[in-house]
Amino acid sequence: MPRAIPDSDHQPPVVTTARSDAATAPGTMTTTVVRALARALTGAVYIAGGYAVVRAPGGRVGKAADTLAKIRRVVPLPIDDELIVRVNGGAQLVAGAALALGVKPRFSAAVLAASLLPTTIAGHAFWTVDDPSERQLQQVQFLKNMAMLGGLLFAMIDSPRSAR
């Protein structure tokens, strides 16, 4: 916030900007620790979820079928839906681990964001659900995933040198 500092010689005031708190300025120890914690917490969700999908994709394959059919109209994908679901889970597992460890965090976040979009559309298409209680549940899950996407977008533009 700019503030005027009067000059004792009756000169016009000198305008300076208030400096950010040293503890939260980019590049400080606090910022570094918080950044690492945020990446670890965000990555953990994808590590756990990706691992579960790789081990046992279960009903996710059926939920993904319609979305995969639509994507195949534009992008040539293998016919095996279960394989695609498992590969998507593997991508989330690997990119989540990389994000959590701070390895190529922007790229890892981009991979997770690209993986999360079709996963969300296939798994939480609340607009197609007739039952009001199930529709509400799916809408909450959809919005949760959109919040996760927002966090990934922040991670994509974050850097240790980013300005506040």
Image (spheres, rainbow, N blue to C red):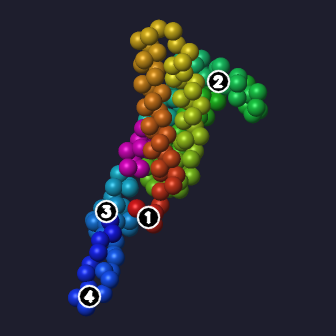
Residue shown at the point (59%, 31%) measured from the top left: 118
Cβ atoms at labels 4 and 1 below 8 Å apart: no
Residue where numbered disc 2 is placed? 67
Residue 41: horizontal and vertical position, in percent?
37, 45
- Separation of marks 4 and 3 at Cα, in angstroms: 36 Å
For residue 10, the mark is 4
Magenta residue check for 138: no
Region rendered in magenta: 38-47
Residue shown at the point (57%, 37%) measured from the top left: 115
157 is higher (above) or lower (below) than 4: above
Tell which tag, 2 or 3, sits nearer the viewer. 3
Residue 122: horizontal and vertical position, in percent?
58, 24
- Separation of marks 2 and 3 at Cα, in angstroms: 43 Å
Principal SS element in the magenta part?
Answer: helix
Q: Secondary structure at mark 4?
A: loop
Q: First in sequence, mark 1 or 2: give its number.
A: 2
Tell which tag, 4 or 3, sits nearer the viewer. 4
Residue 93: horizontal and vertical position, in percent?
51, 40
Q: Secondary structure at mark 3?
A: loop
Residue where numbered disc 1 is placed? 163
Q: Identify which residue, 35 or 49, lies in the foreground.
A: 35
Count of numbered marks? 4
Q: Identify which residue, 25 or 106, lies in the foreground.
A: 25
140 is higher (above) or lower (below) than 17: above
- Separation of marks 2 and 4 at Cα, in angstroms: 71 Å
Name the outermost residue toward the top: 131
Cβ atoms at labels 3 and 1 below 8 Å apart: no
> What amino acid does circle 3 point to?
Thr
Residue where numbered disc 3 is placed? 24
Cβ atoms at labels 2 and 3 below 8 Å apart: no
Q: Within 10 angstroms of label 2, few (less than 14), some, or many (20 or more) residues?
A: some
